[in-house]
Image (cartoon, grey):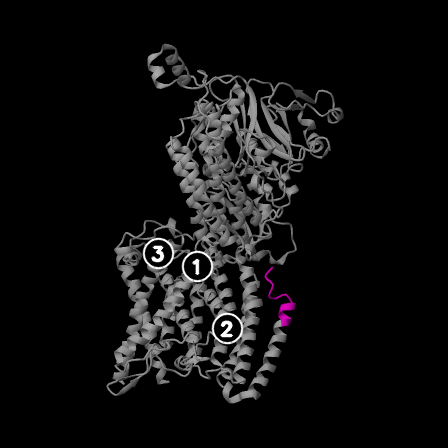
């Protein structure tokens, strides 16, 4: 674990006791008084020795027994220095007010709204503090511990909230009456899943827009708190359902880290391979959507074929295609099928022609270039400020990939390149994904060449892994372990942990707090597409509706992960 | 004029065909349930304003005006094209002058930015 | 007089039968060809090779609920689908489909309306199609439809200029608006081996015509008026049942119109070098019709092929192409063809 604590020059600037470094955690963490939060945040961002330019995540945690009941947890990351810092800001129930950090990190905007929505934390100075994931008519804050998970709300049509795009202030503008406000989504062919954009148009040009999400919200984080640790895994499938296995891995790795165990080599090997196949699927789906939204339907079919074939592999492993639930804390749910290697090698043969066909059709197609080059461009610096990670960020010239910066599983044993493009536009996002899909194939090929490790796919720790059926039926001890694991679940020691993997659309992190019981105390996902999609209004402003549609496809916004 | 009669007949036949199709559909169609689906489609939301409440961007009308200008010019070209063999060199030069004037206007419009959408 | 009316009616019926079979066959071809291009099966359940699928579709259209939005402008809303089919269908009155034949001692031209104004009238009729789209888009009182309608009108009038210029150039060497004379002009050979088709000397004009034809029929890459990923379904978002089917038919018929026009203007129409037309009138008719339809079918296939290969333009790019590229190229082509004719090369 990194051991960096507070950077001295920064600590000295603030009154004694307003920053308390915490020791013994998975990463440096400071408990910060909320009075200094805004100044500190700015310093942390700008000071050359800290340069925390990316706000990864912001979430609330509820500790009803504490005098300051809520804790706002900020996860910071320095892209330039590859360093992490966690800020924890306690606030009381009577006055759950924090300064808004939207001016420091633009990406804080939606995260703060989320904390407001789910915990009732108020952020002073936030430009538009209203509910984001739940319905406008919702009452209470679902992630507070005193909110009954079984409580249901029936919210009817007449409470439908009508977002108002914030008009640019042009009082004198006489064209104003020509503007038209139009709903794009949720039930719109290009609003994959359930997104909604309310746009004010002048002709076809988007003057202003407001993004509305939450149509697929099911409060995954609350559900996690009512299930045992292993039972959470199927819920993670439904986050980014285009690459569900990566979510399994991210969650399991975090819990494994808290338990202090490591999955056996065979499981790690399979996890790496299946994660890369999942990444290929996800990139295929994303680029397919870009192209179908640009009117080139054929490419969509070409890119869905590899996905189909990979589903076959996942099905052979787990029995399921979309929501695989194949990862387990401590390894995998079941051993690999006997023909696993053959299947993988066959896939390595069948996938590239499809990618090549699509590249041949569009990569140099003048119409597609016109539609995508320079469209919705964003600079690397701005993207970082908005909290971008993953392929979208790498398309803007910032080379940050968790697999390179913090190699996990077997990524440091293989040779591969991290594709980085400079344009930051729709076209480069397309190219990054195509290049990454090919790199993933290279990774898989090397892993296959290195040979499949023998051995079990689950740790041999009776407190974590279920005993075999035979043992549970014949041995007393195994039966008791079996009973304890099923009834009480894995006992994870009290503590907290943030761990991340490279998801298909960016850094997929899990921040987990455990109180030492058989159920998670708090599970917070860092959904990579959430901060990316929060930039959408900024990206499409001044462009046409057609641009907006193509842009959306290229951001790879997955509603399951966005709305959780 | 008589040679145009077949076109009129064709129009009548076409109208009959369309009418027959619509009547057939009217006879067999499913009768709808309620009024909810009678609202203009706006992606599942109740529209807060109708399309007719708005005025539309002027740029589209500009295109229409330009079209009228250029289309009228091409109308003049039609008789010339058909009479080309009889007008010969004189007609050619004359029409080149006409086209030159048209092109000057075109360049003017281009330079004024009327052909730029953004 | 009665005799003439009867021949006219027979010719019209002939076209109607052909067109009304062309549309379902085209729908089938489009679906099967797209499936072939996209590496999937396509409709293959209704009848052998799915051939009866269009019929099933037609039945489905008849039985569907017909929804008229309450906010719609009813008269225009009803008129729009009619106008989608009417001009597209009527244009075929002006397409020649064979040589003059002699029936019972009477010379019968194989064209429904043998009029002086030929192409001019055809273009006039074809351009009426835009009204249908604008009316549909406006009368639905739906914002997406309105966008579709507005896009349709701007796009179709913009490309109509280029189309007209290309057609004009093709008429210069012929010296007539009559399409049958355009066909007669193209009989023979260039340089002794090439068919004397306009496409060879007027290749630029043909390209302008072809691109404009795609735009006029709202096909990919110019399908902006209905761009499904942007405008849901564009101008026909609010249409259902048979009214929707009429738009559908209209689109395929205008494709057929422009394909027939392209075949006639640039590829010798019903004529093919080396084919001797029979003296028996019905054989001659079958030959002419067969050759024309074959050429039209090739064009239609091309339409389908392009549709499943390209992305679509953005509106400003479409306008730029129409006004800043096709229009000047069209004028250049006109001057070029005039000069070549003057020099006696054509």
Are labels 1 and 2 assigned to the same chain? yes
Chain hosting mark 1: C
Q: Earlier in the sequence, mark 1 or mark 2?
A: 2
Residue marked by disc 1: C307
Quadrant in the picture for residue C322: bottom right
Query: Which x, y percent locates residue C187?
Result: 40, 80
Query: Which x, y percent locates residue B24?
Result: 27, 61
Range shown magenta: B107-118
Residue marked by disc 2: C205
Up-down: is C268 above or below C28? Answer: below
Q: Separation of disc 1 and disc 2 at Cα?
A: 22 Å
State the residue at coordinates (34%, 51%). C41
Cβ–Cβ under 8 Å for marks 1 and 2: no
In magenta segment, residue B113 = yes
Q: Secondary structure at mark 1?
A: helix
Q: Is residue C265 left or right of residue B27?
A: right
């Amino acid at each position: 674990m990194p051991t960096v604590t507070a950077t001295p020059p920064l600590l000295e600037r603030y009154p004694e006791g307003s920053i308390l470094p915490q020791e013994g955690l998975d990463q440096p963490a400071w408990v910060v008084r909320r009075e200094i939060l805004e100044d500190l945040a700015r310093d942390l961002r700008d000071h050359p020795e800290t340069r925390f330019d990316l706000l990864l995540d912001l979430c609330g945690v509820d500790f009803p027994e504490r005098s300051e009941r809520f804790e706002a947890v900020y996860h910071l990351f320095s892209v330039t220095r590859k360093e992490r810092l966690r800020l924890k800001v306690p606030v009381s129930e009577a006055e759950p007010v924090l300064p808004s950090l939207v001016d420091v990190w633009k990406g804080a905007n939606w995260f703060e709204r989320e904390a407001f929505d789910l915990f009732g934390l108020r952020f002073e100075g936030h430009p538009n503090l209203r509910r984001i994931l739940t319905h406008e008519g919702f009452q209470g804050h679902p992630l507070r511990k005193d909110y009954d998970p079984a409580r249901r709300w029936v919210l009817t049509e007449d409470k439908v909230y009508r977002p108002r795009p914030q008009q640019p202030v042009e009082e004198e503008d006489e064209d104003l009456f020509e503007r038209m406000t139009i709903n794009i989504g949720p039930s719109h062919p290009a609003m994959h899943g359930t997104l909604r954009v309310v746009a004010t148009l002048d002709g076809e040009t988007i003057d202003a827009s407001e993004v509305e999400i939450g149509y697929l919200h099911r409060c995954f984080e609350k559900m996690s708190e009512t299930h045992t640790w292993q039972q959470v895994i199927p819920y993670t499938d439904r986050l980014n359902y285009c690459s569900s296995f990566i979510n399994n891995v991210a969650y399991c790795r975090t819990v494994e880290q808290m338990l202090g165990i490591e999955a056996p080599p065979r499981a790690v090997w399979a996890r790496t391979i299946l994660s890369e196949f999942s990444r290929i699927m996800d990139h295929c789906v994303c680029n397919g959507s870009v192209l179908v939204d640009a009117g080139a339907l054929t490419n969509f079919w070409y890119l869905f074929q590899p996905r189909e074939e990979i589903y076959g592999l996942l099905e052979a492993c787990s029995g399921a295609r979309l929501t695989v639930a194949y990862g387990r804390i401590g390894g995998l749910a079941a051993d690999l099928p006997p023909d696993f290697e053959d299947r993988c090698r066959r896939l390595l043969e069948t996938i590239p022609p499809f990618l090549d066909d699509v590249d041949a059709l569009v990569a140099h197609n003048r119409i597609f270039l016109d539609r995508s080059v320079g469209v919705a461009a964003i600079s690397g610096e701005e993207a970082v400020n908005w909290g971008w990670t993953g392929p979208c960020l790498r398309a803007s010239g910032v080379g940050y990939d968790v697999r390179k910066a913090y190699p996990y599983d077997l990524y440091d044993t293989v040779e591969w390149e991290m594709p980085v493009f400079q344009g930051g536009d729709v076209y480069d996002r397309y190219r990054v994904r195509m290049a990454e899909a090919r790199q993933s194939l290279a990774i898989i090929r090397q892993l296959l060449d290195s040979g499949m490790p023998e051995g079990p796919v689950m740790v041999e720790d009776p407190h974590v892994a279920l005993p075999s059926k035979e043992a549970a039926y014949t041995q007393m001890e195994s039966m008791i372990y079996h009973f304890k694991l099923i009834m009480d679940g894995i006992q994870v020691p009290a503590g907290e942990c943030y761990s991340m993997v490279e998801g298909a659309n960016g850094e997929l992190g899990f921040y987990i707090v455990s109180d030492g019981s058989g159920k998670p105390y708090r599970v917070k996902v860092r959904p990579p597409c959430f901060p990316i999609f929060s930039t959408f209004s900024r990206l499409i402003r001044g462009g046409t509706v057609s641009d907006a549609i193509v842009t959306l496809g290229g951001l790879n916004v997955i509603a399951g992960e966005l709305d959780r | 004029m008589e040679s145009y009669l077949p076109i009129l007949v064709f129009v009548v036949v076409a109208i009959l065909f369309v009418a027959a199709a619509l009547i057939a559909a009217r006879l067999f169609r499913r009768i709808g349930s309620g009024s909810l689906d009678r609202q203009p489609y706006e992606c599942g939301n109740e529209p807060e304003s109708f399309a007719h409440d708005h005025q539309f961007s002027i740029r589209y009308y500009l295109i229409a005006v330009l079209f009228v200008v250029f289309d009228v010019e091409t109308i003049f070209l039609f008789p010339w094209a058909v009479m080309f063999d009889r007008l010969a060199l004189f007609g050619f030069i004359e029409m080149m002058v006409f086209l030159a004037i048209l092109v000057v206007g075109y360049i003017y419009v281009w330079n004024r930015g009327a052909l730029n959408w953004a | 007089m009665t005799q003439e009316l009867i021949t006219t009616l027979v010719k019209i019926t002939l076209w109607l039968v052909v067109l009304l079979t062309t549309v379902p066959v085209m729908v089938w071809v489009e679906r099967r060809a797209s499936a072939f291009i996209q590496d999937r099966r396509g409709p293959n359940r209704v009848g052998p090779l799915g051939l009866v699928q269009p019929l099933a579709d037609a039945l489905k259209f008849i039985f569907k609920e017909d929804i008229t939005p309450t906010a719609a402008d009813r008269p225009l809303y009803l008129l729009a689908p009619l106008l989608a089919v009417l001009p597209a269908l009527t244009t075929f009155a002006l397409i020649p489909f064979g040589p003059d034949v002699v029936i019972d001692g009477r010379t019968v031209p194989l064209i429904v309306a043998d009029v002086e104004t030929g192409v001019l009238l055809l273009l006039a009729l074809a351009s009426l199609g835009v009204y249908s789209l604008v009316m549909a888009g406006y009368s639905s009182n739906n914002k997406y439809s309105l966008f579709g309608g507005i896009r349709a009108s701007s796009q179709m009038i913009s490309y109509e200029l280029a189309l007209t210029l290309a057609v004009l150039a093709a008429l210069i060497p012929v010296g007539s608006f009559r399409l049958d004379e355009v066909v007669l002009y193209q009989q023979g050979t260039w340089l002794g081996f090439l068919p004397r088709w306009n496409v060879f000397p007027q290749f630029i004009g043909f390209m302008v015509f072809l691109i404009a034809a795609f735009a006029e029929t709202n096909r990919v890459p110019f399908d902006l008026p209905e761009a499904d990923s942007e405008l849901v379904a564009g101008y026909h978002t609010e249409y259902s049942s048979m009214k929707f089917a009429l738009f559908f038919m209209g689109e395929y018929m205008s494709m057929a119109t422009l394909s027939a026009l392209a075949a006639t203007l640039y590829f010798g129409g019903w004529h093919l070098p080396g084919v001797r037309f029979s003296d028996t009138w019905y054989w001659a008719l079958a030959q002419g019709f067969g050759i024309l339809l074959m050429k039209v079918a090739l064009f239609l296939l091309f339409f389908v092929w392009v549709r499943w290969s390209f992305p679509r333009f953005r509106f400003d790019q479409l306008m730029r192409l129409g006004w800043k590229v096709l229009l000047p190229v069209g004028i250049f082509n006109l001057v070029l063809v005039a000069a070549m004719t003057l020099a006696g090369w054509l």
